Image (spheres, helix red, strand yellow):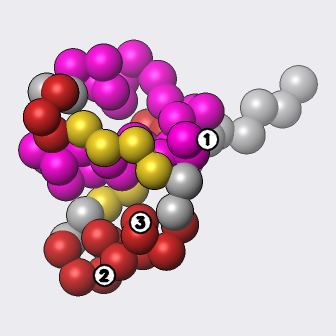
Amino acid sequence: MKYVVDHHKKHVHEQRYSLDNCGVDRIPSDAVELTDSQDYIKELENTHSYVKCPYCHEVPLLID
């Protein structure tokens, strides 16, 4: 599973970067979907107004 889809808030989370700020653990069980399909995610974004979570899709660049 690569993506966590929140059908309640219409957010798409990238599992490997999801943080506490994302609230993935607080998504109601009847509104969560797990998928690996990037095509499905693009379809949700283009036809159903889903958006990528700003917390887990915009990983900050850390520089020493």
Secondary structure beneath label 2: helix
Numbered badge on residue 41? 3
Question: Where residue 48 sits: x, y (%)?
Answer: 18, 74
Numbered badge on residue 9? none
Numbered badge on residue 46? 2
What residue is drawn where x is 64% and y is 39%? Answer: 60
What residue is drawn where x is 23% and y is 82%? Answer: 47
Quarter of image, res 55: top left
Question: Where residue 28 sits: x, y (%)?
Answer: 13, 27
- Label 3, label 2: how far apart the Cα atoms are: 9 Å
- Say which of marks 1 and 3 sits in front: 3
* Label located before the other in sequence (2 or 1): 2
Q: Above or below — where is 23 with respect to 16? A: above
Question: Where residue 63 sits: x, y (%)?
Answer: 84, 32
Numbered badge on residue 59? 1
- Label 1, label 3: how far apart the Cα atoms are: 19 Å
Judge left or right: residue 25 versus residue 30: right
Q: Rate crowding at label 2 as few (under 14), some (14 to 19) or many (20 or more) other CA atoms within 10 Å.
A: few
For the record, the magenta segment spans 1-26
Report the front residue among 53 and 6. Answer: 6
Are the residues at dot 1 and dot 3 in contact (C-beta closer than 8 Å)? no
Q: Rate crowding at label 1 as few (under 14), some (14 to 19) or many (20 or more) other CA atoms within 10 Å.
A: few
Report the front residue among 61 and 31. Answer: 31
Q: Is residue 64 magenta?
A: no
Q: As shown in the figure, which amino acid type bears the numbered disc 2?
A: Asn
